[in-house]
Image (tube, rainbow, N blue to C red):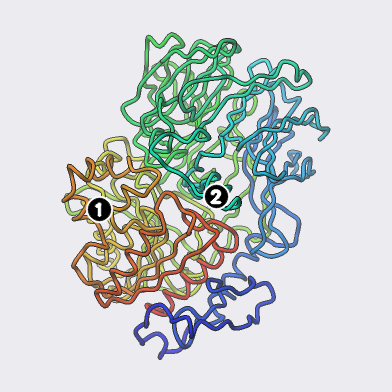
Amino acid sequence: MPPASARARTDPGPIPRSRAKLRPSSNPIAPKCTRWCATTPAWGGEGMGTTAHTTIDALYTRLMRPGSGEPYSATDACSADGETVYFIGTVCGDTVFDATRSIVYRASRTGTMTPMYQGRAKLLELAPGGARLAFASSGHGGGDDRLIVIATDGTIVSEMPTEGRIEQIGWSPDGAALLVLVAGAGTDTTTLAGSLSAATDRAAEAAEPVIDDGTPDPEDRRWLSIHCPGRPDLDRTLAIAGMIWEASWCGTAGIAVLLSAQSGEAAWYRAGLAIVDPETGSVRSLYQPQDQIGQVRGAPDGDRVAFIEGVASDRGLVCGTLKRVDAAGDTVEALSTGKTEITSIAWRGRTLHLAGQRGLVTAIGDHDLGPDGYRERWSSERWSCGAYVPTSRPVGSGHGIAVMEGQTAPPRLALVGDDGFETIRIFTENDDRADTTSVSVRWRAPDGLEIEGILVRPVSVSGPLPTVVDIHGGPTWAYRARWEGRQRSTPALVAAGFAVLYPNPRGSFARGQDFARRVQGDMGGADVGDILSGIDHLIAEGLADPARIGLTGSSYGGYMSAWLPKLRPQIAAAVCISPVSNWFSQHFTSNMPILEELFIGGVPAVSGQEYLARSPALSAAKTQAATLILAGALDRCTPIGQSIELHRSLLEQGSPSVLLTYPQDGHSIRSPRGYIDSAARTLDWFLRHMAP
């Protein structure tokens, strides 16, 4: 805890260059000092103490086990029989600041692991029958990925170079060919991957100007390649007009695609389903959705396509109604899954294996496509699976394979069945600690709508605590049981005596599409009341200290962390990560301007007053909240100008504000160095301005 004098003083704002002197760190694994690293005196004359970055270093050293060579988390788990499991393990470098490695592993049901491929791997797919594995490998120079196929003993069967970034891989139902979706150099990554542009990076390296004359970038395209392992003479690339966002085999004579006529990230929101003939490349439209589509999965027999349709704000994060359309496009049917909204689909023969979310509950089940065909095999509010949304893959005739986790229960490889889940391998030694409690909370919004969230508190402390409200991105995303290793500074805040509230305001998914639609055309409106009433509920229950309420969040959460202090002056402190502060300039500089059209309503020329009325940087209301703004310079979703506008508007009004720009980061600051530094600064900020 900082000394009382440091806690009480008003922060002077950004430091002049003459005072930005570097101090050596006493921490042997701290990053090399720059103006933005955790050892830089960024808060004024006293600088940032060593407490915060030492605490965060120790936390992530425990969680990630740097230097051990062992995985601390996993993705893409798959298995044919449940006895042998394959997955991609994430391995930390020698320090928590080093880039992580993604290694393909084979594991027995007893948990014994064997590394099979030590390069940078992603998108692991097991062939029908379980005889071969395919995955993408990056880091080979030039920014282009390679498609790797290996036998189950690790022997490389084939290796196909590409001229872009591989985004999806799928085996044909007979296991003879692979469908590969490749993104060109002009495409942007998703917000989950930082919303970065490879084209801008390459132009910068070549010291050339980036030209925009309004015409589509010829490199802003995705294409489908078909690779036949062992028969490269049969490999081919399909020429398809439009932008392909997802693709899946539909039998062996068709390919189901999510397709838009236009390119650019905004086009994804209006993409529809189509069938492509793999021989001719001809395209036949199947279905144009009302909302957004995700998880396009063609049936192995080729007679239908399953998919999820729902209100979505981010590509790659679709939670909603399970639907199917016949391959002729004549019939589209919504398949009932009760109150569970679906996030993950995989075919298990002629049935579907599913994962999804129901409020704060994660569920895994199957659907036989009949009127009452949904069968839930497992559900839990304490446990969940998947890094961003619940995810599971089918095993045999009645099981699933998933990576399970909880608040203080680290990721573990697990076989899921009707009797629960069987742990195959836990990825850290610090299992199921008892010093933190995580409970669901519910309250009423001003209009009577029930809102829910998760409250994390230290077990050993009672009474009203300083409380940080961590607001999720989106707005259509939702909190659930998630491992503390994915929560930036929360574990350190709780250990220091704070409580952290994770609210799911209207617009969050997993509460039905009507609940999600309540934010459309009203973002920054009624959802504000949802969050503020949650704070009031905790205060009324004697759980939160009204004088020490803080806000944080990234993207939509960053926006709300900047917006709420304008409406509730009593907020003590805020840490805004990748925020939006001016919806006018956001619309004309973001790579996805359709977002505010959907969630504020209309374009600026028509709905200008709404854009003005919901922009923190344009609000005349003065906030007393000490505001820390963290932003990535390469972010194309919420460009750096949004953070600059917020910072300067706060200073102009006499409000305390500090802006940190991470020069090599994009959206939400996810690089190892940036993530650790942002976690330390968040912890330090709340300790300074609302310490227990």
On the image, the x and y values in percent for residue 273 come to: 43, 21
Q: Is residue 692 in sight in this rendering?
A: no
Q: Which badge, 2 or 1, comes first in the chain's sequence?
A: 2
Compared with 308, 485 (above or below) is: below
Q: Is residue 557 left or right of residue 162?
A: left
- Image point 31% across, 59% down: which residue? 581
- Image point 62% across, 71% down: which residue? 58
Q: Residues within 10 Å of mark 2 (few under 14, many from 20)?
A: few
Cα distance in 3D space between marks 2 and 1? 40 Å
On the image, the x and y values in percent for residue 466 come to: 37, 73
On the image, the x and y values in percent for residue 654 come to: 26, 78
Q: Identify the image quadrant of residue 346.
A: top right
Q: Quadrant of the C terminus?
A: bottom left
On the image, numbered disc 2 is attached to which residue? 208
Give SS at disc 2. Answer: loop
Q: Is residue 24 in sight in this rendering?
A: yes
Q: Is residue 72 left or right of residue 467?
A: right
Q: Nearer the viewer, residue 484 or 204?
A: 204
Q: Label 1 sits on what residue type?
A: Gly
Q: Which mark is residue 524?
A: 1
